[in-house]
Amino acid sequence: MGRMTVKKLVGLKGKRPITAITAYDYTSALLADAVGFDVVLVGDSAAMVIHGYESTLPIGMEEMLMHVRVVARTVKNALVVADMPFMSYQPSMERAIENAGKFMKLGAAAVKVEGGREVAELVSRLVSYGIPVMGHIGMNPQKFNVYGGFKLQGRDKEELLKDALALQDAGAFAIVLEKVPSESARYVTERIRIPTIGIGAGPHVDGQILVFHDVLGLIPGMEFRFVRKYLNGFEIMKEALERFKGDILSRSFPSPEESYE
């Protein structure tokens, strides 16, 4: 089918589930694209899984530009979406347009902004300048201080729908629904024309996304109800490193076959 585009992605609604995952570097991008995911999101979750912060707030444009540059250069088939980090679009329309443009110049095919009705005007402006936008409603990680933690949102399905419709009308091509009740996600998905991509939003959405490190179990202690861990990656990699360390201490590495004469 060739490279995924915004138009192709929208056309998948009602036909088959959309597959999405995050990536932040050459290795994760290479793996995601080799598997054939539809969407690779360069998430501001890099703040937590790459840089070790407790939330997404500390990461800025400088770090995100670095991650997007590598991922966009590596991915050949998936739609690469760049997350707009905290305070990269909130201060002014001008700053938001400038920062979104930086991501596009590096090879991203779209950007993602958190918020509903409050960012609709921004979404409209970005789209008018040729920058496709993915929305993000429900639990917005950048607002975790307002919520008092990463808590379930979207219980009022009518309010959630108003946000979704505002984003759709502004020109967003898809919407991430994060940590909302399954019924709310179904209600919204059935009433909008553009695809919904869930993370902790149940099965009644048009697609699913999870964080790369969560799927592979790479960070101990980072457990979420909505994550299905397919590998205990931390323990497997730790065991391999322990064997390597042991081989060094026992002087069994390197062997003659692993040495040059």
Image (cartoon, helix red, strand yellow):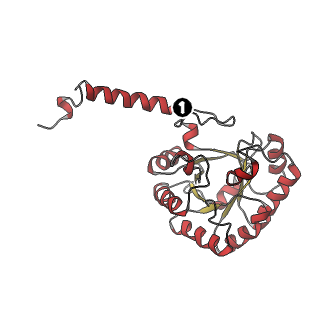
Q: Position of residue 74 (x, y in %)?
A: 46, 55
Residue found at x 43% / y 31%: 238
In this rendering, is residue 59 above or below 35? below
Would you place residue 183 above or below residue 85 in this image? above
Question: Which residue occupies the foreground of this view, 15 or 56?
Answer: 56
Residue at left 75%, top 57%?
A: 194
The N terminus sits in image quarter: bottom right
**Total numbered labels:** 1
The image shows residue 18 at horizontal and vertical percentages of: 66, 48
Q: Nearer the viewer, residue 157 or 94?
A: 94
Is residue 210 left or right of 165 when viewed as pictured?
left
Q: Is residue 175 left or right of residue 256?
A: right
Q: Look at the image and tell me in which quarter the C terminus lies.
A: top left
Residue 98: x, y in percent?
Answer: 59, 73
Q: Secondary structure at mark 1?
A: loop
Where is mark 1, residue-wise?
231
- What's the residue type where badge 1 is placed? Leu
